[in-house]
Amino acid sequence: MSRLPLARALALLLPVALLGGAYASQYLGGLHPCEMCWWQRYPHMAAIPLALLAFATKATPRTSAAFTALAAMAIAISGGIGLFHAGVEYGWWQGLTACSTTPTGGSASDILTQIMATPITRCDVAPWSLLGISLAGYNGLLSVGGAVAILALLSKKGRHA
């Protein structure tokens, strides 16, 4: 497989896999995301349509490579947020938010019911880790590493459509 198709595939598969893992941990594993967890998801959500545009424009290699590079940048942004979040979890620095959920709409009693039913999810506590690395840490490592790999594939001479 030549480099551009491999970069395109990685630019699509990586955010799909990481978002899939995030949603699986939320809905199957019961790990409710904090505010910073959501921040990590948004760039992956942007990377997927960018990667799909890279596939849609594969007949024009320069355009396809540009969309692939944009997807890689979005993935890298998610990774940067993930690494920052992991630092907050490990107590290396303070987070930027109180990580609270604010209910919207409804009467005062409805809002109170929503508040009482809302799970408390703190950004400075890792709800899960493997080998001492939290989900935010894994997202950071995999996203930054994947973005670097995609951009390296795109920078090689002789890439093909």
Image (cartoon, rainbow, N blue to C red):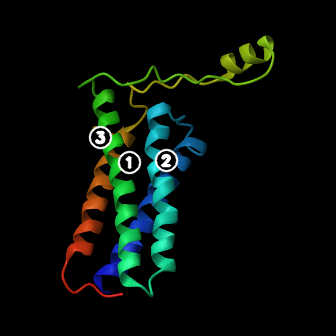
Dot 2 or dot 3, earlier in sequence: 2
Secondary structure of residue under mark 3: helix
Residue drawn at (64%, 23%), measured in percent from left and top?
A: 118
Where is residue 61 drawn, in percent x and y? 37, 83
Where does label 1 land, which residue?
A: 78
Where does label 3 land, which residue?
A: 83
Kind of residue at disc 1: Ser
Where is residue 64 drawn, in percent x and y? 41, 77
Kind of residue at disc 2: Tyr
Where does label 2 land, which residue?
A: 42
Q: Give the Cα distance between marks 2 and 1.
A: 8 Å
As drawn, 21 above or below 48:
above
Q: Which quarter of the rendering shows the N terminus?
A: bottom left
Residue drawn at (26%, 57%), measured in percent from left and top?
A: 145
Dot 2 or dot 1, earlier in sequence: 2
Q: Which mark is residue 155?
A: none
How many neighbours does mark 2 have within 10 angstroms: few (below 14), some (14-19), or many (20 or more)?
some
Q: Give the Cα distance between marks 1 and 3.
A: 9 Å
Mark 1 or mark 3, whichever is nearer to me:
1
